[in-house]
């Protein structure tokens, strides 16, 4: 089990998930702290003081330069962080072409669509596979393949699983002349055949 | 939930970016204008209102409650948005194979329904557990259950799963109610 083939299984949504978790936790913590102060856990006088405390305002007034610089820095940091997560979330998943020859001038590039189509057709020839879909994922430096298979009802999963590497993937590697092509296979078992209404 | 976390995550990213930009702009603006000058946000009014509120006032408590609820929802969304794919063994190095829980449930369900005297079955499958509820009119649980267990076990063993799920079979039969 390699990291490259595992990460090709599905598009990563780590950034969005971490951001959602962090914002949620911060909101919970802030709410808990506010409630704790309001209930008088930090002293009954503290609970009755205004939310914008004169002592804090006084401190900020005495350290005006530091406060302003820190506030602006935090603002810029949040802006950059938000934009990074947003751009990564909205960017379509890349479909890298495969560079077989890196020589400048005579480089050879196989387009992602061509590889995916060839592998899809090959995969659909395997006994028991009803439908297949292939797609290149990752980036130029680390290309990987994502292969989705819909197995027919009653097909032998183990046979398909064995034949997949022996025939389809090894052939793809051979014809492309690459030593390794990290591949993630998603199998849907006993998928109902699509029926057409006449 | 994965779609939800992606949408929520993108919206939060916009929110964080906008808040950061406003904070930087407002602070820089009031610094340059020397005083309570505002550009987009009427923060002196907010400050005046907050100065009139104590920590134990109702408004602050209600706000904290809303904030806690929102935070809890976000945490739940983030925590439940995990992949439930079932890993199969790798047929070769650099090749990972998964299947969906629905697939496993489907394949087990088909085998169970194909057995004699089974009138219906529902299956819930995860990577670690397969639960089968079968109903039968003609056989009692005692008769049918060992047979179904063997069938489900054979089906699961026939798949190159990484972790062998625990199997539970329950049979509903009117014969048992008599």
Image (cartoon, rainbow, N blue to C red):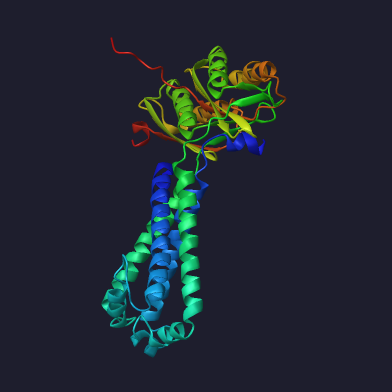
Q: Is residue B162 in view from this perspective?
A: no
Q: Quadrant of residue A179?
A: top right
Residue at image location 38% in from the left, 70% down from the top: B29
Q: Is residue B38 in view from this perspective?
A: yes
Total numbered labels placed on residues in the image:
0
Q: Quadrant of residue B124?
A: top left
Residue at the top extreme, as displayed:
A198
**A123, above or below B6, in the image:** above
Q: Is residue A99 left or right of residue B144?
A: right
Residue at image location 40% in from the left, 73% down from the top: B32
Residue at image location 39% in from the left, 58% down from the top: B18
Question: Relative to the observer, which residue lies in front, A43 or A101?
Answer: A101
Question: Relative to the observer, which residue lies in front, B33 or A2?
Answer: B33
**A43, above or below B128, in the image:** below
**B120, above or below A195, in the image:** below
Residue at the bottom extreme, as displayed:
A45
Q: Is residue B88 left or right of residue B8?
A: right
Q: Residue A77 location, x and y as percent?
A: 50, 61
Q: Quadrant of the C terminus of chain B?
A: top left
**B53, above or below B76, in the image:** below
Question: Relative to the observer, which residue lies in front, B17 or B81?
Answer: B17
Q: Residue A58 location, x and y as percent?
A: 42, 87
Q: Quadrant of the N terminus of chain B?
A: top left
Q: Residue A3 location, x and y as percent?
A: 65, 39
Q: Residue B140 location, x and y as percent?
A: 41, 30
């Amino acid at each position: 089990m390699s990291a490259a083939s595992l990460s090709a299984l599905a598009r990563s949504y780590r950034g969005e998930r971490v951001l959602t978790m962090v914002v949620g936790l911060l909101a919970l913590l802030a709410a808990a702290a506010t409630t704790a102060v309001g209930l008088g856990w930090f002293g009954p006088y503290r609970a009755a003081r205004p939310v914008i405390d004169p002592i804090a305002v006084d401190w900020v007034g005495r350290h005006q330069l530091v406060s302003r610089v820190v506030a602006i820095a935090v603002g810029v940091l949040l802006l950059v962080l938000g934009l990074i997560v947003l751009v990564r979330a909205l960017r379509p998943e890349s479909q890298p072409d495969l560079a077989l020859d890196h020589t400048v001038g005579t480089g050879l590039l196989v387009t992602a669509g061509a590889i995916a189509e060839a592998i899809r057709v090959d995969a659909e020839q395997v006994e028991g596979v009803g439908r297949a879909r292939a797609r290149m994922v990752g980036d130029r430096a680390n290309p990987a393949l994502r292969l989705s298979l819909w197995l027919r009802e009653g097909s032998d999963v183990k046979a398909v699983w064995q034949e997949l590497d022996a025939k389809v993937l090894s052939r793809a590697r051979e014809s492309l002349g690459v030593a390794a092509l990290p591949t993630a296979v998603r199998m849907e078992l006993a998928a109902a055949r699509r029926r057409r209404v006449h | 939930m994965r779609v939800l976390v992606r949408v929520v995550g993108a919206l939060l990213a916009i929110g964080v970016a906008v808040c950061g930009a406003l904070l930087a702009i407002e602070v820089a603006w009031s610094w340059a204008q020397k005083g309570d000058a505002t550009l987009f946000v009427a923060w002196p009014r907010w400050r005046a209102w907050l100065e009139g509120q104590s920590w134990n006032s109702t408004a602050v408590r209600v706000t904290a409650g809303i904030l806690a609820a929102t935070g809890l929802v976000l945490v739940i969304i983030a925590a439940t948005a995990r992949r439930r794919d079932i890993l199969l063994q790798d047929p070769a190095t650099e090749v990972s194979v998964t299947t969906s829980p629905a697939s496993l449930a489907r394949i087990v369900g088909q085998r169970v329904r194909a057995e004699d005297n089974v009138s219906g079955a529902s299956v819930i499958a995860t990577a670690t557990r397969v639960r089968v509820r079968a109903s039968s009119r003609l056989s009692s649980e005692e008769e049918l259950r060992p047979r179904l267990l063997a069938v489900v076990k054979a089906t699961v063993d026939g798949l190159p799963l990484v972790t062998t799920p625990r199997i539970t079979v329950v049979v509903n039969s009117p014969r048992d109610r008599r």
